[in-house]
Image (cartoon, rainbow, N blue to C red):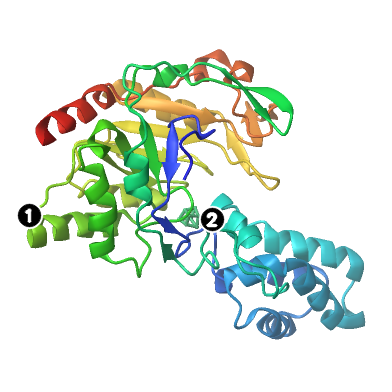
Amino acid sequence: MSDETKIQWCDSTVNPVMGCGGCPLWPTPAALRKAPAAELAQHGVPAQEAQRLLDGALDGLTATDVYQRRRAIAAKLERQAGPGARNGRRMRGALQACIERPFSCYAGKLHCNKGLNGEKPDKKISKGYAPTFERVTCFPGRMAEMARKADLAGKPRPDRRVTRKGKSRTVPGKPWLDGMPRLVFVSDMGDALSRGVGFGFLKDEIIGAVSSQEGARHIWLWVTKRPARMAEFARWLREEHGIPWPDNLVAMTSVIDQRMARAVDDLRKVPARLRGLSVEPLLERVQIDLTGIGWAIVGGESGPHGRPFDLAWPRDLRDECRQRGIACFVKQLGRRPVENGQALKLRDPHGGDWSEWPGDLRVREMPGAFRTLARKTAAIIR
Ligand code: SF4
């Protein structure tokens, strides 16, 4: 839990559930075979032999195991490919890179450092983390703790000086949040709607806190890559318990490519007062049906293997939002922004400092409804 996050579009984050069932940003070992198989082929290893080597190297491993052991796996593949493979040593580096590249989920990588490690059996789990990213773990009480945090409605979010370990630095403010209630991002370290997380837990933990007198002062932004399960949960809440979806709980899903844009249809089935999209990291030009959507966040991919982000893509989305009266928030341009076919050099490795951006992309809009939803919910509860 963090009551002050660097994430530009919210004030705080909370994770009632740590870990996740995965998505294309944290692929299964089976999905990870294609690139190493192609790399082995490049070095003259026949396809059948490559398949046999990959079976031996990856079978029985979770994605966490593969990420933690990527160096050893690349070395083993290189060794076993034997003298028949061309450019063996270069092959090792290339194999390691292509094993590592698809792992772009920040939450997953952090769990690899903080959780159990098959290569270091004595290592302890850091407090507050799931044992491994795949072992989705519930942490009851975190939502209620966040609900008790101070009300921020009417308050500015200016730059601040902070001193840590004797070093002082400026934390940039978030003027676009000025006056808003506290905006809490629910589930940035996993996906609370992963299979295995019971609806009973989600009702008590999330709906209970959001609808409490204290929680009703804030706006909660619940992001999932499983909007179909969120819609199923909403139906269960209403039909089994007669509980409507709280007005101050914004239903959100992520879209990273055209294939995922279909999930927006499922999000529309969640009977929320406001629905939002996190179109990040955007990996290709997408066409999204924005019907029923009140907010769209867009951004490029950060991290050492961040993929190109053509600035024409956020411009398309921004224009579509403008036409439909939807608030648009450009979060970051990522590691490799591209303008008119040319790489755009930025100092900030995440491309998150908007003073470096083309002026027309400095768009950080918040839905006006955020100002009223929490107040209304609080008034109803009182
Ligand atoms: S936490 Fe989100 S980005 Fe990471 S693997 Fe799960 S769904 Fe994907």
Give, as a three-letter code, the residue at label 1.
Answer: Gly
The kind of residue tagged 2 is: Leu
| 37 or 327, nearer to the observer | 327
The quarter holding residue 25 reads bottom right
* Residue at image coords 75%, 59%: 97
Q: Left of 310 or right of it: where is 151?
A: left
Check residue 192 in the rendering and tell me which mark sits there, or answer none. Answer: none
Q: Earlier in the sequence, mark 1 or mark 2?
A: 2
Of helix, strand and loop, which one carries label 1?
loop
Q: Report how far apart the C-alphas of labels 1 and 2 lie in the structure.
A: 36 Å
Which residue corresponds to mark 1?
Answer: 242
Compared to 296, does 361 lie above or below? above
Between 12 and 26, which is closer to the camera in this rendering? Answer: 12
Residue 345 visible in the picture: no
On the image, the x and y values in percent for residue 345 come to 72, 26
Q: Which residue is at 29% across, 33% downward?
A: 218
Check disc 2 and report the residue beneath it: 25
